[in-house]
Image (cartoon, grey):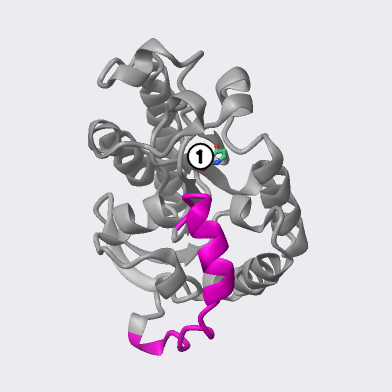
Amino acid sequence: MVAAVAAVRVAAAEAELALLAYGDAVAGCERCALAATRTQVVFGSGAPDADLMFVGEAPGFHEDRQGVPFVGAAGQLLSKLLAGVGLSRDEVYIANVIKCRPPGNRDPQPGEIEACESHLFKQIELIRPKLVATLGNFATKLLSGKPDGITRVHGVPQEVSLGGNRVLLFPIFHPAAALYTPRMLEVLEADFRRIPELLGTAGRQTAAQAPPPQAPVQAVAETATQLGLF
Ligand code: URA
């Protein structure tokens, strides 16, 4: 028993070191043209052995300057939503689909996602989260492997295989979509409230047991579509 606990701790320490080493290697990434315009690679931040991981879209201006994901206005809302369910940023891991800021905060291009996605898959493999909350369309489509947009699938957990492990994927709206839209904030808060329960059941719950999707938020969706968040 003691030997088994020690073995688990050694494995966790090795995974943490491997994540650090991988972050160092990615800091010099030149797989796509964003290497020429970024200030720095924004690898990810938080607990290297987190049960809960968030995956956003791409670093923005502030993230590019500070080298940390979700530190701008959307990030502040993310921290607030986390606090609302009793979690802090230090207890979760936060990363993005692409690690470098697209100029002018434009949407990531398919070639950029393709070039960068293995960095995210490696992070997931090393962190081994139980629950991965995808923020918005880009992360949801990439990690679910399905074309369904966030408006359709938000709030509905799905079982997927990521980094060699079964993971519960929980698509939610991107916090940026809720910054100026009170109705969207309510939807996001409602989805966040499910996180503690999902963390408890992650690894056991199947998609068949998941509750039905909430009522569509069409009017809000139209606004956010214009923001490129869906
Ligand atoms: N939006 C994202 O998707 N990621 C960030 O890191 C910041 C804003």
Ligand 1 shows up in the quarter that is: top right
The range drawn in magenta is: 208-230
Instruction: Check disc 1: other Cα within 10 Å, few if <14, some if 14-19, many if 20+.
Output: many
User: Which percent across, then down, holds residue 218?
Assistant: 52, 75
Instruction: Tell me which amino acid carries mark 1.
Output: Pro
Q: Is residue 133 left or right of residue 90?
A: left
Viewer-closest of 122 and 37: 37
Is 123 contained in the magenta span?
no
Residue at position x 65%, y 45% in the image = 74
Determine the image quadrant of residue 32. Answer: top left
Q: Is residue 5 visible?
A: yes
Numbered disc 1: secondary structure: loop
Q: Is residue 201 left or right of residue 209?
A: right
Q: How many marks?
A: 1
User: Which percent across, then down, holds residue 92?
Assistant: 59, 48
Residue at position x 54%, y 58% in the image = 224
Relative to 213, residue 171 above or below: above
Residue at position x 64%, y 26% in the image = 62
Viewer-closest of 144 and 1: 144
User: Which percent across, then down, holds residue 8?
Assistant: 42, 48
Is 221 contained in the magenta span?
yes
Quadrant (top left, top right, bottom left, bottom right) of the C terminus: bottom left
Viewer-closest of 192 and 36: 36
Residue at which label 1 appears: 48
